[in-house]
Image (cartoon, rainbow, N blue to C red):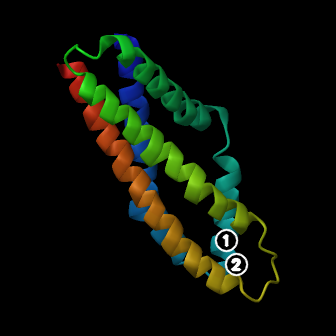
Amino acid sequence: MFALKLFAVLGCGLIAGVFFAFSTFVMSALARLQPNEGITAMQAINITVINPLFMGVFLGTAVACIFLLISLISKWHQPGTVYLLVGSLLYLIGTLGVTIAFNVPMNEALAKVEPGSTDRASLWANYLVNWTFWNHVRTIAALAATASLTMAIAI
């Protein structure tokens, strides 16, 4: 059980760091580019992020959180279970859920934008604002999940 908790903590922390980087400088750098360049760069990022290392940590952490939640059924009376519950839900809802509900659909819409499209600049401006907002939510949720799961280990 300790190894599962540790994996979840490290996974949440790694994902929080990736999302933090996007929130604090990657999206700002992309916003400085011309819309065509920014869109092309983000499209490349969205393709490249689908790789075994990132997806293994991103989805593996979700699986670890699900197993932690299942383990709580029989261990609710033990110290630290509230932290496990909160941390797991923060990751599953605030990180994975937000990604699926908001960031991925925006990425899919961006992938379909035609190079000569007249609304390309306005779509990019909206994408930058909305995608970054939801990325902030994911960052905070992953960081809070890291803290909560760490507390569960510390107790």
The residue carrying mark 2 is 36
Q: Is residue 45 above or below residue 71?
A: below
Q: Secondary structure at mark 2?
A: helix
Vertical order, 26 against 138 (above or below): below
**Is 89 left, or right, of 121 in this rendering?**
left
Kind of residue indicated by mark 1: Ile
Extreme residue toward the bottom, this view: 118
Report x, y in % for residue 2: 34, 12
Viewer-side residue, 58 vs 99? 99
Q: Is residue 28 left or right of residue 120?
A: left
Q: Is residue 96 left or right of residue 114?
A: left
| Amino acid type of the residue tagged 2 in the rendering | Asn
Q: Quadrant of residue 34?
A: bottom right
Q: Which residue is mark 1?
A: 39
User: Which quarter shows the N terminus?
Assistant: top left
Vertically, is 79 above or below 148?
Answer: above
Q: Please state the horizontal and vertical placement of residue 106, each as a whole percent of the image.
A: 63, 64
Q: Which mark is residue 143?
A: none
The C terminus appears in which quarter of the rendering?
top left
Q: Residue at x 33, y 29 (%)?
A: 85
Residue 47, position as x, y percentages in the image: 71, 51
